[in-house]
Amino acid sequence: MTQAPSDQTRDAGQRPGVCFWHTDVETGLSCSRCGKLICAQCLVQAPVGIRCRECGKAQPMPTYDVRPANYTLGIGVAVLLMILGTPAWVILDNLLLVFGAYGPVSGLMAIVFGYFTGDLVSRTVNRKRNALLAIIACAVVVLAYLVSRLFSPFGFGLMDLLFLGVGAFLAWQRLRP
């Protein structure tokens, strides 16, 4: 006559426990993180062993786990860049006019401004990535450019759209999800 697995365990001097969630199921398995006893129905396979339901939940990657404080910092830096970037853009446009440069050269600043806006917002939020942060950075590039055009000696041309698009794309790339 063969013994049931639970009887064999008792004979070996080990007392089986019961599952934390299923108190009617005897088990010898425990979570590798918290140590709770778990049955075969409750276990979750993890790269470091078996885990209970609570410890085995998927955690978001820290890079994409953006908290409200990160949004606040990102928006604050973006607004600061817009406040400082728009007058600087107008001043540079006037300097270009003094040195005889023409409008499309001014559009190249959109590319530089887009890259630095995306990079500074990214650094401020500890390199976190999120679609909303990317949209904020793109919006700052576009708004700063449009406001600077109001006070710039250069008009708004089709080449400016290309430069503005590249600048917004670079801001997006630094923060994209």
Image (cartoon, grey):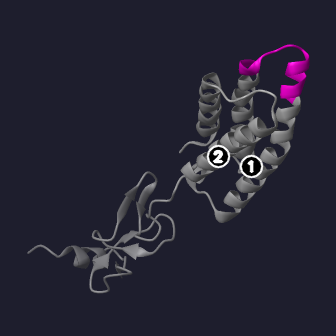
Residue in the foreground of this view, choosing between 163 and 24: 163
The amino acid at mark 1 is Ala
* Label tally: 2
CB within 8 Å, label 2 to label 1:
yes
Task: Judge the density around disc 1: few (<14), some (14-19), many (≥20) Cα neighbours within 10 Å.
Answer: many
Mark 2 falls on what kind of element?
helix
Note whether 126 is above or below 68 in the view shown: above
User: What type is the residue that disc 2 sits on?
Assistant: Ala
For the point 36% across and 73% down, which residue is it? 38
**Tag 1's secondary structure?**
helix
Location of residue 62 in the rendering, given as x and y in whole percent from the top left corner = 59, 53
Residue of label 2: 139
Q: CA distance from mark 2 to mark 1?
A: 9 Å
Seen at 58% across and 53% down, the residue is 132
Quarter holding the N terminus is: bottom left
Eyeballing the image, is 117 above or below 94? below
Identity of the residue furthest to the left in this view: 1
Image x and y of residue 4, in percent: 17, 76
38 versus 22 height, above or below: above
Mark 2 neighbour class, 10 Å CA radius: few under 14, some 14 to 19, many 20 or more: some
Nearest the viewer among 149 and 108 is: 149
Q: Residue at x 45, y 71 (%)?
A: 54
Extent of the magenta region: 92-105
* Camera-side residue of 128 and 162: 162
- Left or right of residue 35, residue 89 in this image: right
Q: Is 79 or 31 nearer to us in this picture?
A: 79
Horizontally, residue 46 falls left or right of residue 119, namely left
